[in-house]
Image (cartoon, grey):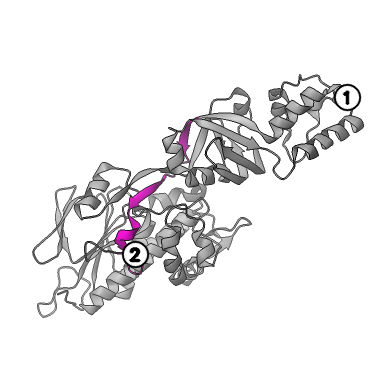
């Protein structure tokens, strides 16, 4: 039986009654949020947050290029769930209880205003992730959460009285009544072993939200060039996405590539990240329509060089490289562009084939698909169905979203549910 005390001091008892001891493992978005919600909801509980690294909220710090893409401006639970390649169905119910509007209100109540950009992504108006970090750290301190860095978990066992016995990597031991694991993706063997030691199964983790490495000389000349809308497909897989693209010195990036990598995470891993990426630079226009535009250009600008007169909306540098890749010489004028060359150029515009030879992490961010099997978790409370008193939140679960603030939203939602559930269990005593 879990008993309550009126003090937040872990060393203080009231008439011999100890407070409910709750340990949250993982100082990222999900773990931090859960600890705050839990401590604010049950003021008598002793809440301790452990982080294996040297700093808290490291992914929050680097998210969105240092601006922190807090969430996405989508307030319909079912529509929001469609942005999760894995876990979307399980999140519909949770999103009906805590969604982006609730996140916005939570931060607003603590003095942090969020803004919505044209694509739906939401950032702090300061455009600084430090604003979010300061808010979370401050809220945890105000709620009485005890935080510890460089305190990783080596193992967890259950004692005869059903309490969790934690062995830390620094040699210490802790005991608690309720335990939340929010350690991020199961990228290490140690994390998988820990989860499995508590009776759970783990879907094998593989990378998601990555960019494509392309070994193509003319593409490397386009580093920094972007386009608002292209269609990218992966040959032989059925994977297809449309959206903004960015050329880099190593290959292809941008939202369209990141979304493709998320939806195709396991498929692309099965291909060892070696495949042909096909790009339609002018989606929405048929080959016939483009052919008519080229013929019209030949009539209007016959004396001009093809390479110097781009077709909108293609950037000049991209157009030049596509013309050359189609085998059209630099000095070719529109009036001299023959039928065969025109056909090659049309094909290059709607079906550029680029050899992908590997992947790269999106900036410093790293997201995985895979994790704790969702049917082993109660998504009303985030409590384990196989190990009472154990809860999960965040990316440790087999949940991952596309780019745009969706992974943080899953962290806030699952952290909120877990924090509330543990607080209610502590209050029931």
In this rendering, position of residue 377 left or right of residue 223:
left
Which quadrant of the view contains residue 384?
bottom left
Question: How far across and how far down the image is residue 206, in percent?
Answer: 38, 42
Question: How far across and how far down the image is residue 3, in percent?
Answer: 16, 76
Element type at marker 2?
helix
Q: How many marks on residues?
A: 2
Q: Mark 1 points at which residue?
A: 335
Q: In which quarter of the image is the C terminus?
A: bottom left
Question: How far across and how far down the image is residue 168, in percent?
Answer: 18, 51
**In this orientation, which residue lies closer to the viewer: 176 or 259?**
259
- Residue numbers of the magenta segment: 357-383
- Relative to 205, say whether 391 is above or below: below
Element type at marker 1?
helix
In this rendering, position of residue 114 left or right of residue 313:
left
Q: Do the residues labelled 2 and 1 touch (CB within 8 Å)?
A: no
- Neighbor class of circle 2 (other Cα within 10 Å; few <14, some 14-19, many 20+) is many
Question: How far across and how far down the image is residue 218, in percent?
Answer: 63, 25
- Residue located 80% across and 28% down the image: 308
- Relative to 128, say whether 245 is above or below: above
Asked if the magenta segment contains residue 137, the reply would be no
- Neighbor class of circle 1 (other Cα within 10 Å; few <14, some 14-19, many 20+) is some
Q: In which quarter of the image is the N terminus?
A: bottom left
Q: Mark 2 points at which residue?
A: 34
């Amino acid at each position: 039986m879990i008993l309550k005390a009126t003090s937040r001091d872990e060393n203080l008892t009231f008439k011999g009654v100890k407070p409910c001891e709750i340990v949250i493992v993982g100082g990222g978005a999900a773990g931090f949020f859960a600890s705050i919600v839990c401590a604010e909801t049950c003021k008598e509980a002793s809440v301790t947050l452990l982080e294996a690294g040297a700093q808290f909220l490291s992914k929050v710090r680097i998210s969105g290029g240092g601006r922190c893409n807090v969430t996405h401006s989508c307030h319909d639970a079912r529509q929001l769930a469609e942005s999760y390649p894995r876990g979307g169905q399980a999140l519909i119910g949770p999103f009906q209880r805590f969604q982006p509007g609730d996140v916005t209100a939570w931060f607003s109540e603590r003095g942090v205003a969020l803004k919505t950009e044209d694509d739906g992504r939401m950032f702090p108006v300061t455009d600084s992730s430090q604003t979010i970090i300061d808010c979370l750290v401050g809220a945890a301190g105000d709620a009485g959460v005890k935080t510890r860095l460089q305190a990783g978990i080596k193992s967890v066992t259950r004692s005869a009285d059903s309490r969790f016995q934690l062995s830390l990597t620094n040699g210490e031991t802790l005991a608690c009544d309720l335990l939340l694991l929010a350690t991020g993706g199961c990228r290490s063997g140690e994390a998988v072993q820990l989860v499995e030691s508590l009776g759970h199964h783990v879907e094998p983790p593989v990378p998601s939200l990555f960019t494509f490495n392309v070994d193509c000389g003319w593409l490397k000349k386009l580093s920094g060039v972007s386009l608002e809308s292209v269609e990218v497909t992966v040959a032989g897989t059925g994977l297809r996405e449309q959206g903004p693209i960015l050329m880099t010195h190593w290959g292809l990036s941008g939202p369209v590539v990141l979304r493709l990598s998320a939806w195709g995470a396991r498929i692309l891993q099965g291909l060892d990240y070696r495949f042909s990426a096909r790009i339609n630079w002018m989606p929405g226009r048929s080959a016939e329509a483009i052919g008519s535009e080229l013929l019209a250009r030949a009539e209007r600008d016959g004396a001009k060089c093809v390479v110097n007169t781009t077709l909108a909306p293609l950037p000049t540098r991209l157009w030049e490289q596509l013309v050359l890749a189609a085998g059209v010489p630099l000095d070719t004028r529109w009036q001299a562009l023959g039928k065969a060359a025109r056909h090659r150029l049309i094909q290059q515009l709607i079906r550029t084939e680029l050899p992908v030879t590997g992947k790269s992490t999106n900036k410093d961010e790293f997201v995985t698909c895979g994790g704790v099997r969702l049917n082993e978790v109660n998504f009303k409370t985030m409590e384990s169905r196989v190990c009472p008193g154990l809860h999960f939140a965040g990316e440790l679960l087999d949940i991952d979203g596309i780019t745009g603030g969706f992974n943080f939203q899953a962290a806030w939602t699952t952290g909120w549910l877990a924090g509330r559930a543990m607080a209610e269990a502590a209050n029931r005593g």
